[in-house]
Amino acid sequence: MDEELLKALNKSDILGFYIYSTGGYIVYANNAFCNFVGYTPEELKQTKLIDLIDESYKKEADGIIKRRLQGEDFVVELQEILYKTKQGFIRPAMNFCYTATYNNNYAGIVIVVDQAKQKIYEIFYRILSNINRIISETENEKEALEKICKVISEEKGIDLAVIGAPDPKKLSYKPLFAYGGKAYKTLFKKSKISIDPQKPSGRGTIGQAYWTKKIVSVGDVYKNDNLSYWRDLQKRFGVYSICSIPLLRYGKTEYILTLYSKIKNLFSEEYLFLFENIKKVVSAALEKFEINKLNRILLTAIDKSFDLTVVADKNLKIQFVGGRIEQILGYKKEEILGKPFKILIYETADESLFGFYRKLRKSNLFSEVALCKAKNGTPRKVMLQISQIKSDTTYYIAAIKDITNEKVLIKAIDDILKKDPLTGLLNRDAFIDAINRFIERAKYKKILGGVCIINPVQFSSINEMFGFEAGNEILKSIAKRITAFLRSYDVVAKLETSRFGVLFKDMSNTEDIISVSSNLLNLLSKPYKTKDGRAIQMIFNFGVSVFPVDGKTADELLLKAHFSLKEANRNSPSISFYKEEIKEKITKSLKIKMEAEKALSKKEFALFYQPYFETLSQKIAGSEALVRWIKEGNIISPIEFIPVLERSNLIDRFEKYIVDHAINALKKIPKPLKLSINITPTNLKNKAFVDFLTKKAGDFSKNISIEITERLLLENLSKAREILTQLKDNGFSISVDDFGTGYSSLSYISNLPIDTIKIDICFTRKMVEDAKTRAIVNTIIYLARQLNLKTIAEGVETKEQLEILKEFGCDYIQGYLLAKPMPESEFLQLINSNF
Ligand code: C2E
Ligand code: MG
Ligand code: MG
């Protein structure tokens, strides 16, 4: 190294620098290193390097020191070291060492980078992944807290971890779990702690954390007057750093996690945001923690050491290269010395050299994942840390770690940050991201989103009764059922404990959200099989909020969904929405569902019959069975209750009842007359129902027309064809109801075994004054005839409509003009008088 550089290092207050020589004594150290270990330069000169090194590294370090002093030239071998300071606390550092000569003796030259930062990220990374794991696999709150306390205490550097609960009435504090060294636990037990601000015992970090609801951290207890009350214990313990983290539930401090360490400034201000993350995650994983970019980068660099160091002068000309440059970039050292630093930088569209220099000039420490250019021109992904040191002249020291092949590590970190370990679903953070991304897109369109929190009621008792394993299996099954139910672009996540979150994207109205969530509720409520063959029945509650009505950010929507869930939990199983009007809709449909069940037993459903007529002769050609719910003298329209029944498992019973009554009525008609029966897609897709229908109809099937909706055709065409063919084979005829309102076209229908199309009432209504509609109706009728299909016009109310239909050649008409739906007796009378 040239003299200039040595001078620069000497003045650096970022990088520590020392030289050791004969006998292993330190012969030179710069101020930064003196500060780092807490000794004066004079004291250091009488100190053997080995005495500055922590026990755990001593043996290895001793070997290296000896080899260097014998003149062996090798680069850094032991990079991470724990130094022991004068005050007796421990400091982690990164070391870059080289063999050199000093006053004609062999010597070791060492550059020291304070590594507290990396260390803390490392610790944080492990704590966080452990907490994530614990939260996902532990149902019981206390158990989870205890486990969390324990894993934190197992981190090197953390000597004691305590979780306690404040009592706001008595202003007292009760430790619940304490893990760490035995001696420390004993000492902790002796310390009097409260949350009473009037007393010294309540003014410590725990008391402060309780009152401020904020993390309170102290880097040096001896410099903090609030903590002087415990001075004696602190000295016996040797503690320097304390950090109290309040764990909140719905804004209330339930517990306080306190960490104690003998390392000074371990929880310094700078790292508070990391502990903030722990606070959020542990606070029943209620809030998200944000991990900033730097954090991610450092996490990727956790894999300790750097591969290569490069020193450049103020003009960014390379002055020194150490480490594995040839393996990583393909250059020989000599090839690169004196060259501009930029030859190592790979320019991309996003990252220009100019940008790189600007960043570099702006700050003393540059730390990023960047691309380096290898000799053959290919990019290498590296973790690049550049420190700028200024003395008479400026130097740049770059520490480079090749992470080209560390995708696995990056992915692992990404997974920890985004995925729930048990189910593999997204975790809460990723869920929030997904909601925000959806909002970004949805706010410019007229679409709704439903955020739904799914709560399996009393899941903890499943764990208790069937064991942990079975509980986990069920959670996985729930995850599978939800995933299979959703459309591919919807989002499902595993939230805290046993809860799940779902985002229904791109919904066109709130009814759809009600409908999908209640279908999902039905699906989840089916029994779960355990490995040993037992069937477990579970109850679910859903709390739902709707974008944009209930909120315009993910946080807001989740909060409202939580509020809704609280309400749902009051009368499980249920689905609760946040907004009154949606709530009304859902209460209405729930009420209908409940009352419909009773109505079925009480036979409150009656069939009305509406005839239809030949258009030209106006003779009765057939009739349609239309259901009515007669409830306490009022008639409820099928439009209100059929969709509700269809979403519940009652539709099967209900339509069997209808079929039964309709066929009985048909048998009473003296002369064969066609009867149309409306059947929902749900039942048509059910083989058992179709079998029932066929059996019930027997020979009468030739007098029955099944009215289907276009929806049946849309969902799965080949399945629909199969069903219709079967019905045809059994003698039924088929009508397509409400033709023209859906997507089906005549060419589509011409390939299916269909006999009749019923032109929807809206065409009949509009065609009088609207020429376009008239043209459409005309075309439909014309084409239908070409395809051998009969046409029925629905909802004919006026003579004018009748005239137009006559002119167009529509086969049949149905509507109030000629007959309204009527009770069975009236209908039979009408028939009798007509024959
Ligand atoms: P849909 O099958 O299209 O039935 C025709 C609807 O139009 C009936 O309403 C009928 O009363 C009404 N309507 C008939 N002529 C006129 C008219 O001239 N003017 C007006 N404004 N309306 C007329 P309803 O009975 O309220 O039934 C509504 C829908 O409920 C039916 O539409 C059908 O989709 C469904 N539905 C009714 N009964 C059953 C049933 O037993 N099973 C099933 N699955 N669905 C049914
Ligand atoms: Mg109909
Ligand atoms: Mg219709």
Image (tube, grey):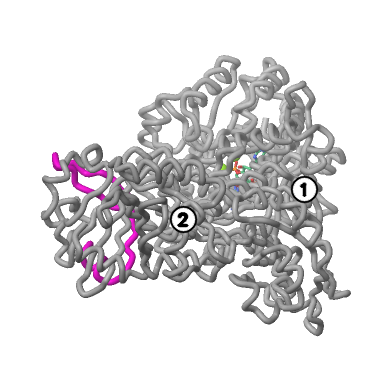
User: Which x, y percent locates residue 202?
Assistant: 78, 77
**712 left or right, relative to 810:** right
Residue that mark 2 sits on: 48
| The residue stretch that appears in magenta | 356-382
Quadrant field for ligand 3:
top right
Mark 2 element type: loop
Residue 216 visible somewhere in the drawing = yes
Q: Is residue 377 magenta?
A: yes
User: Which x, y percent locates residue 681?
Assistant: 59, 33
Amino acid type at circle 1 is: Glu
Q: Is residue 793 magenta?
A: no
**379 left or right, relative to 524:** left
Q: Is residue 162 above or below residue 222?
A: above
**Foreground residue among 326 and 822:** 326
**Foreground residue among 577 and 493:** 493
Looking at the image, how many numbered discs can be counted on the residues?
Answer: 2
Residue under the image location 77 percent in, 21 percent down: 532
Q: Are marks 2 and 1 in contact (CB under 8 Å)?
A: no
Residue that mark 1 sits on: 143
User: Which x, y percent locates residue 458?
Assistant: 80, 46
State which quarter of the image contains the N terminus. bottom left
Q: Estimate the spatial distance between the alpha carbons at disc 2 and disc 1, rounded to whole Å.
A: 48 Å
Q: Is residue 264 above or below residue 331?
A: below
Q: Residues within 10 Å of mark 2 (few under 14, many from 20)?
A: some
Residue under the image location 18 percent in, 41 percent down: 378
Q: Residues within 10 Å of mark 1 (few under 14, many from 20)?
A: few
Note whether ligand 1 is within 8 Å of mark 1. Answer: no
Residue under the image location 61 percent in, 32 percent down: 622
